[in-house]
Amino acid sequence: MTSFPLTETRDPAVSQTVDTPDGPFSMIARSDGSVLASGWTVDLEVLAGRIAPSLRPSAVTPGTIAAADTVAAYYAGDLSAIENVPVVQSGGDFRSRGWRTLRDIAPGHPLTYREFAEAIGNPTAVRAAASVCATNAPALFVPCHRVLRTDGTMGGFAWGVDVKRSLLRHEARVTLG
C-alpha cells in the first residue's frame, strides 16, 4: 500500500498496471472506477503526484480497474474505447473546458496548441492550452497526446515523446488504414 500525506481524510484508491506495446501503463482510480491518473510508468508515487492535491487519495492499494480492459481494446484498434472512461480532475474553468475538449479531438487528427486554444474558446491562450495538456493526469483517457506544437512537431509529453509518437502512429494506422 502506498500512502500520501494529506491534510484531510480522503477515500483510498486502487491501482493496476497493464502491459502495452509502449511499456507498462499504470492507473490509479477511485472505488467507483473513475480514473484519477494514468500513464506509462510503474512508479505510483510519480503517478499520484500528478493528481490534484484536493483529489489525492489517502492510500493506494493494488486492485482491478475496469479501464484496464479499455486500454487493451484501444491498443487492439478500438480507438473509441477510451472515450467513455470516467475520469476525475480538478481545475478552473479554462482547464476543465480544455480537458473536455481533449476528449473531443478525433483520433488520427491531432490539433496544434493554437488550434486547441481556439477549440477551448480562447485563441490567444496558446501557452495556457499547453498547460492544460501538461497538467492532464489521466493520460490516454483524456488524450493530450493528440496536441502538437504550433509548428506541427511533437513537443513534450509527460510520458516521453517516444510514447506520444507511438500513440499518434497507432491512431493514424487505425484511422487512415
Image (cartoon, grey):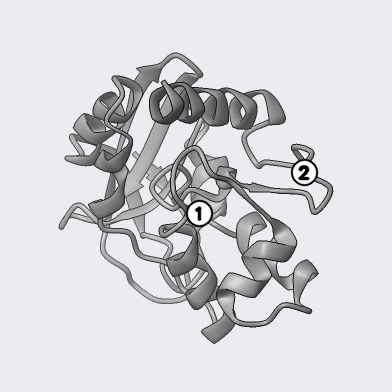
- The answer to whether 19 is drawn above or below residue 11 in the figure is above
- The answer to whether 136 is drawn above or below residue 71 in the figure is below
The residue lying toward the viewer, choosing from 57 and 68, is 68
Q: Is residue 85 left or right of residue 8?
A: left
- The answer to whether 56 is drawn above or below residue 110 in the figure is below
Residue at 31% of width from left, 24% of height from top?
77
The residue lying toward the viewer, choosing from 108 and 45, is 108
The amino acid sitting under disc 2 is Gly
Question: The N terminus lies in which quarter of the figure?
Answer: top left
- The residue labelled by disc 1 is 137
Q: Residues within 10 Å of mark 1 (few under 14, many from 20)?
A: many
Residue at 77% of width from left, 69% of height from top?
126
What is the secondary structure assignment of the residue under circle 1? Answer: loop
The amino acid sitting under disc 1 is Ala
Q: Is residue 72 left or right of residue 58?
A: left
Residue at 55% of width from left, 50% of height from top?
144
